[in-house]
């Protein structure tokens, strides 16, 4: 095996030694302080040392921030890393500063475990035994297998797995429906595609039933608000740096002096010190809290009745659609005059959420009287098994109080962002129209032919005709680490007659890579030319022109080359369609010319290359979701069937009546609270008494950067548990514990802390799975997906990865 070879001149020893200065400061300073991880040796400068070459790069992992990097290069090696030095320390024209993950990118680029050569698997899937092969052998094997699968089963048997390792430039982009892999497959007859993402499956499916889309006000608009209410939204960890959502949150709040209430089972880093109040809530119960608040708003006349009458459908009898049952409206549901006959009083909500009733009443009065109020949600609440209902329920608070479509208000969704024009590699149309949800690919390998539209959410056809036989996995770890129930996936993939070929294109030997049949070493984005836009960035957009920091090392190749070579082997016509005769640089210039045509204010290609980063403030100020609709609902209707905000959705009523659902699965035309499998009130709690979820952690971006030593040292992988739960189990802070359920077991240290609600446990998601899969399968890496379920949520058929029950015991 060749993966442990080090790049020239950098041994593991130097890496660790040189990290000392950085890691101390990292622990002392917190993760987003603006200092560079500079090797100690660099401080001792020698008089005849050649000048560093400074190359602009970007951190392109999927954390939603997107930061500029300035890579200092000596002797064709990245020697140390700085971040953006343009702009001021001023709100809206700020430096796009990298967090310590991005600043430690040198440790990924030069990692001793980077993939250097194409390899083929020689052990069993998951065992991690590989043999070096030539590029020719690798590419021939892939293209022959692809031809065979397409010939025997058709293009529908080829699947491109969800991956998010590179959030996209013009050329490099992992987005499975828009990557170079998808471009190639569309040139070759198409592939089975998917809908939804692991990020937003439930909210992206649900919100459009209410609003026609899923938009929120820009975070910068907080400067116009009186009250910030955050449901399961933790930007201090999930939008750490770069575009500066946390920065906006702080500085905008400084301007508006708004109060901030954080509703989360954990006392998050976003709350810590910034919040006015933290309200811990049982996971999966936000919709009950909303209903309790709505009961107070209605009974104390705090609802905006003119807004509800003019802009909404289904709040009360007046606007209830004709096809709805009598008393099918929201007000009846809340007051107990609907089908269930239960009044959603604060006492009722308190029993479900664990929040005292008087606190719910106080919260309702605050939300009802603060004008305007910025009510938002992260994506934690929706990554629950009842997340579709929850996300629409949270939107009810701004709707009831008329906060939608105005400055300082919000829709109840997460933030939107300003982005400068970007042109990606064009995609020919996918001739295959069949889709599955991004979460159900393991089922489609296991029993694809049994999957139907009405039960499993197959789209474009009544049922799948063929199972998945070939998987492309480019820049993702969602074969195992990031997909639920790793042990089940392992079992499914053991049978090589089911899925015949798994191609993984990676930088590292991840746990997913261990399941590859063919494993290809990619260049990183900082090693090739590309232009990349901001991700979430409030009202300041930007472009970064990435230049290759070093020459390609070993036999690593860029994705454009890899896919062009596969295309060549599929036939000269496919190759021509894929490349259109252009080199990677030709494409970049071609796409940039299109951008300039759309947006003449952009700097020229050469000017941008010289600048490295180009920033622009949103000329329209702050983005306000549904503003045009609020200003003139007749002229600018929403994309819902009625053109209005649909509190009652007739479309959802039809789905609820026609889809095959199990007893504990609820789809409802109203944003009601419903309990769910593996929730707080599931009888299974007698066996597995603690709720568990895996939050997005500052130590990593999912699993990316998970193999960087200084980050591991700074932010330990541990399971959060309240002293109330720890004490009877004899668990002290730092003790090694086993976290388990009937799907698997993880061993890691406990963090005993009042920062989490009793009855609930949590660990950072994305830690590298580390188990002997031929033996006891106990995971010593702390990967939460050893414990999560592959059962999908009812409407989106998405990943309910935050809904789990476990037991915790001292080892
Ligand atoms: N239990 C649980 N599971 C979750 C979540 C959760 O909250 N809880 N969150 C889900 C969410 S929201 C998401 S988005 C997914 C994310 O899951 P993934 O998309 O799998 O994200 P990563 O784990 O970061 O894996 C990205 C991979 O891309 C590789 N990579 C990075 N840059 C490059 C490059 O330039 N070239 C190549 N070839 N490879 C590269 C990295 O080495 C890494 O292995 O996880 C999901 N899984
Ligand atoms: N550092 C870092 N940043 C990241 C990522 C990362 O891996 N690391 N991943 C990026 C990606 S791809 C995505 S999709 C986003 C994910 O962003 P989110 O999905 O918003 O992140 P989470 O941490 O899963 O959830 C946010 C908060 O919800 C809380 N929560 C969980 N369940 C519930 C609930 O039922 N009710 C309430 N009220 N709160 C709940 C959690 O405690 C957490 O603090 O983050 C992005 N940013
Ligand atoms: S991980 Fe995210 S916040 Fe950190 S440097 Fe990279 S893009 Fe920026
Ligand atoms: Mo995500």
Image (tube, helix red, strand yellow):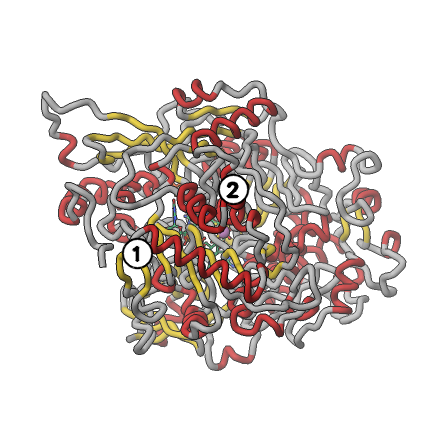
SS under mark 1: loop
**Closer-to-camera residue (144/710):** 144
Density class for disc 2 (Cα within 10 Å; few <14, some 14-19, many ≥20) is many
Q: Residues within 10 Å of mark 1 (few under 14, many from 20)?
A: few
**Quarter of the image holding residue 674?**
bottom right
Tell me the quadrant of the picture where the C terminus can be found: bottom left
State the residue position of label 1: 716
What is the secondary structure assignment of the residue under circle 2?
helix
Which residue is label 2 attached to? 578
Q: Residue at x 22, y 55 (%)?
A: 2
Q: Report the side of 570 relative to 111 (left or right).
A: right
- Among the 4 quarters of the image, the one containing residue 98: top left
Give how far across and how far down residue 36 sits, in percent. 27, 34
Labels 2, 1: front one: 2
Task: Specify which label sits upstream in the sequence, 2 or 1.
Answer: 2
Name the quadrant of the N terminus.
Answer: bottom left
Q: CA distance from mark 2 to mark 1?
A: 45 Å
């Amino acid at each position: 095996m060749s993966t442990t070879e080090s790049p020239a001149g950098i041994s593991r020893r130097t890496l660790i030694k040189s990290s000392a200065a950085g890691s101390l400061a990292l622990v002392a300073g917190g993760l987003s302080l603006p200092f560079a991880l500079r090797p100690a040796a660099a401080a001792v400068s020698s008089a005849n040392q050649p000048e560093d070459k400074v190359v602009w790069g970007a951190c392109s992992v999927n954390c939603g921030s997107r930061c500029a990097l300035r890579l200092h290069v000596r002797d064709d090696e990245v020697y140390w890393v700085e971040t953006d030095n343009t702009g001021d320390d001023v709100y809206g024209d700020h430096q796009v500063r990298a967090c310590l993950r991005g600043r430690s990118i040198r440790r990924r680029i030069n990692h001793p475990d980077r993939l250097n050569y194409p390899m083929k698997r020689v052990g069993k899937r998951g065992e991690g035994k590989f043999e070096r092969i030539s590029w020719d052998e690798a590419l021939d094997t892939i293209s022959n297998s692809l031809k065979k699968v397409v010939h025997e089963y058709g293009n529908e048997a080829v699947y491109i797995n969800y991956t998010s390792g590179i959030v996209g430039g013009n050329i490099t982009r992992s987005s499975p429906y828009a990557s170079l892999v998808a471009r190639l497959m569309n040139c070759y007859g198409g592939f089975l595609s998917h809908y939804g993402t692991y990020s937003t499956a439930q909210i992206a499916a649900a919100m459009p039933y209410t609003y026609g889309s899923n938009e929120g006000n820009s975070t910068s608009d907080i400067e116009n608000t009186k009250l910030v209410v955050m449901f399961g939204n933790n930007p201090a960890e999930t939008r750490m740096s770069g575009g500066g959502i946390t920065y906006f949150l702080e500085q905008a709040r400084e301007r508006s002096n708004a109060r901030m209430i954080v509703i989360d089972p954990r006392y998050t880093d976003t709350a810590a010190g910034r919040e006015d109040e933290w309200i811990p809530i049982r996971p999966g119960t936000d919709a009950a809290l909303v209903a309790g608040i709505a009961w107070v708003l209605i009974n104390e006349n705090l609802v905006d009745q003119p807004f509800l009458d003019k802009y909404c459908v289904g709040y009360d009898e007046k606007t209830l659609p004709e096809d709805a049952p009598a008393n099918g409206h929201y007000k009846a549901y809340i007051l107990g005059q609907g089908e269930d006959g239960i009044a959603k009083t604060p006492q009722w909500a308190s029993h479900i959420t664990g929040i005292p009733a008087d606190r719910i009443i106080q919260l309702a009065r605050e939300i009802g009287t603060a004008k305007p109020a910025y009510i938002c949600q992260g994506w934690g609440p929706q990554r629950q098994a009842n997340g579709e209902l929850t996300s629409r329920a949270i939107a009810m608070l701004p709707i009831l109080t008329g906060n939608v479509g105005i400055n300082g208000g919000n829709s109840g969704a997460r933030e939107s962002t300003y982005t400068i024009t970007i042109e990606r590699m064009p995609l020919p149309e996918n001739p295959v129209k069949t889709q599955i949800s991004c979460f159900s690919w393991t089922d489609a390998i296991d029993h694809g032919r049994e999957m139907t539209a009405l039960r499993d959410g197959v789209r474009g056809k009544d049922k799948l005709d063929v199972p998945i036989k070939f998987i492309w996995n480019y820049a993702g770890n969602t074969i195992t680490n990031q997909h639920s129930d790793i042990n089940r996936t392992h079992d499914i993939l053991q049978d090589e007659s089911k899925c015949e070929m798994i191609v993984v294109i990676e930088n590292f030997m991840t746990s997913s890579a261990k399941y590859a049949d063919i494993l290809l070493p990619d260049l990183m984005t900082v090693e090739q030319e590309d232009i990349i836009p901001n991700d979430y960035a409030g009202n300041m957009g930007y472009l970064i022109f990435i230049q290759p920091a070093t020459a390609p090392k070993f036999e690593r190749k860029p994705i454009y080359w890899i896919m062009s070579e596969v295309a060549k082997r599929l036939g000269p016509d496919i190759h021509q369609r894929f490349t259109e005769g252009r080199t990677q640089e030709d494409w970049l210039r071609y796409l940039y010319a299109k951008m300039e045509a759309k947006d003449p204010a952009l700097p020229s290609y050469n000017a941008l290359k010289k600048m490295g980063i180009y920033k622009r403030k949103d000329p329209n100020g702050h983005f306000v979701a549904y503003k045009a609709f609020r200003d003139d609902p007749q002229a600018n209707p929403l994309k819902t069937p009625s053109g209005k905000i649909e509190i009652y959705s007739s479309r959802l009523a039809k789905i609820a009546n026609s889809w095959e659902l199990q007893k504990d699965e609820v789809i409802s035309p109203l944003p009601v609270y419903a309990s769910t499998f593996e929730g707080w009130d599931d009888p299974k709690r007698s066996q597995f008494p603690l709720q568990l979820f895996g939050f997005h952690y500052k130590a990593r971006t999912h699993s990316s950067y998970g193999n960087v030593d200084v980050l591991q040292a700074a932010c330990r992988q541990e399971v959060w548990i309240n002293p109330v739960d720890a004490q009877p189990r004899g668990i002290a802070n730092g003790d090694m514990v086993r976290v388990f359920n009937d799907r698997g077991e993880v061993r890691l240290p406990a963090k005993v802390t009042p920062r989490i609600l009793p009855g609930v446990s949590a660990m950072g998601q994305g830690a590298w799975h580390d188990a002997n899969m031929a033996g006891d399968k106990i995971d010593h890496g702390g990967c939460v997906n050893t414990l999560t379920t592959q059962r999908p949520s009812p409407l989106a058929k998405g990943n309910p990865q935050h809904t789990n029950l476990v037991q915790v015991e001292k080892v």
